[in-house]
Amino acid sequence: MPITRYSVWGVPGLPEIAAGDDLVAMIVEAIDAQAAEDADCALKDGDILIVTSKIVSKAEGMQVPVADREKAIAEDTVRVVAERVHPGGVTQIVETRHGLIMAAAGIDTSNVPDGVALRLPLDPDKSARDLCAGLRDRLGFNVGLVITDTMGRPWRVGQTDVAIGAAGIVVTDDLRGGVDANGRPLQVTITVLADELSGAADLVKGKASGIPVAIVRGLGRLVTDLNAPGARTLVRSVDDDMFRFGSAEAYRLGYDAALAELREASGQPETRLKQRQD
Amino acid sequence: MPITRYSVWGVPGLPEIAAGDDLVAMIVEAIDAQAAEDADCALKDGDILIVTSKIVSKAEGMQVPVADREKAIAEDTVRVVAERVHPGGVTQIVETRHGLIMAAAGIDTSNVPDGVALRLPLDPDKSARDLCAGLRDRLGFNVGLVITDTMGRPWRVGQTDVAIGAAGIVVTDDLRGGVDANGRPLQVTITVLADELSGAADLVKGKASGIPVAIVRGLGRLVTDLNAPGARTLVRSVDDDMFRFGSAEAYRLGYDAALAELREASGQPETRLKQRQD
């Protein structure tokens, strides 16, 4: 029985990236330098590159002065999902323009130069397609590419990397309608390969090590058309999202709705409601 | 610069597991059979075994007749987090006895014999410790072990594997107080290694392939004392959980609370509240 075996390693040696830098060239150079010392590290057909969003944002000029951080968060926020007051201020969990649910709209100041805050790429799937296309052109064979960012999650401590952009790979393994090894219908239906790849790469990239790119080799079966569905398809639709608001926020919405209904029923003017409808 | 490189592969050939089976012996046998064909597959010091909870449950006798599925769900449920009515019935997302938030308390009927539903292990960290200790004894060197299950997540489509039990590995990389490559404080604080390992292993195990064990080699730096904190420490504390209830459920709680308060204030007897307080 042929087994699937894959390997993962990090690509060190990328310089600090600045707006306008040619990321394809810089990634290929870093990989070439690594391959000069270890020939196994030269890219091959079917490899998948896992790229931290930070260097993509930097190359795309998404830097803002730290003083404009709040403004940038507001610009990238579609809606506030939850917020919590703590001694250091208020943490807002928001839905970003990308459909991602993240603290501070994913804008952060670690691993960036002093005085700078960094927004996420405006369209990470497009960024991934551009990078992947550039790499394929230059290499002459097919690779896949995932752009990752770090996310907290409800219910479980800590953070893990997930895919916010993807190109040239199959992002999910859709098993709906499939059967298990015994021929019985599978209850688990969609395996999110792109997120699993992102987490796998984080194990060699880490947060403190300055390694923004990892290579996954041995999962070439996941490498596909450049225009296959991207990471945006991993965002759960509103109708399907049972956790659209924080519990405290949803509780307050319910509380306020009951008060508004009762005031309406009792003939009292409901000023706030009317203002909202204007 | 020395790079971290690791590899992941699946272990095929495990038979259907029954209650009381010696899982340590069966896993070692399957690995030995694989190593007879490919010597690289023989276990080494520092390897990490990623084991699907299903075979652990089966060995521990957690099978129940399908007819008792609802009763088993109720037994393993601490509280209902959210529920949704759909054409096929009601899906309940619950908190399990393990602190996990899962549909149907993690009880499922795929990859199990006909007529059987399978509960999660009662104490997956203990299961992991027992298995890991058994493997270390038998092998004469140190390995780590993670027990995984498949979970949906809010906000993002699909499912991924996470760690529900762990032994002999460092489950998180706690970077609180650490600095980035530029010496600036890290905003991301706790990387959840055990979940990243679980997802990485799922890429070779899959759901339809009947491969319940994967080996991760090259991350021996994560292998540690048998009694290091387990996967239970990955459960977010109640105080820290902003998504303790589904949005619809929290909305209803708020709505009902407002009605109750108003009735109380208006001097009307609030029967339901009084019943609750009794």
Image (cartoon, coloured by chain):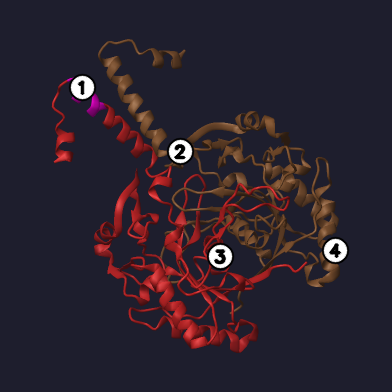
Chain colours: A brown, B red
Amino acid on which disc 3 is placed = Leu
Q: Position of residue B230 (x, y in %)?
A: 45, 66
The chain carrying label 1 is B
Q: Residue at x 43, y 52 (%)?
A: B236
Residue A118 left/right relative to A94: right
Q: Which amino acid, by three-letter code, is at mark 1?
A: Ala
Q: Give the spatial CA distance, label 4 vs label 2.
A: 46 Å
The residue where tag 4 is placed is A33
Classified by dominant secondary structure, the portion drawn in magenta counts as: helix
- Do marks 4 and 1 both belong to one polypeptide chain? no
Question: Tag 1's secondary structure?
Answer: helix
**Disc 2 chain ID:** A
Q: Find out whether the residues at labels 1 and 3 contact each other: C-beta distance under 8 Å.
A: no
The reply to whether dot 1 and dot 2 touch (C-beta < 8 Å) is: no
Q: Read off the residue under disc 2.
A: A244
Q: Are marks 1 and 3 on the same chain?
A: yes
Residue type for callout 4: Ala
Spatial CA distance of label 3 from label 4 is 28 Å
Please name the residue shown 46% across and 77% down the image: B132
Query: Which chain's residue wears label 3?
Result: B
Q: Specify the segment rendered in magenta.
A: B259-266
Label 4: how many Cα within 10 Å (few below 14, some 14–19, many 20+): some
Single out the mark in the foreground, 4 or 2: 4
Kindly indicate whether the residue at mark 2 contacts the one at mark 3 (C-beta within 8 angstroms): no
Q: Nearer the viewer, residue A6 or A170?
A: A6
In the picture of the structure, the residue carrying the numbered disc 3 is B197
Camera-side residue: B207 or A276? A276
Q: Using residue B39 as the reference point, say whether residue A143 is left or right of it.
A: right
Q: Position of residue B267 (x, y in %)?
A: 15, 21
Q: Earlier in the sequence, mark 1 or mark 3?
A: 3
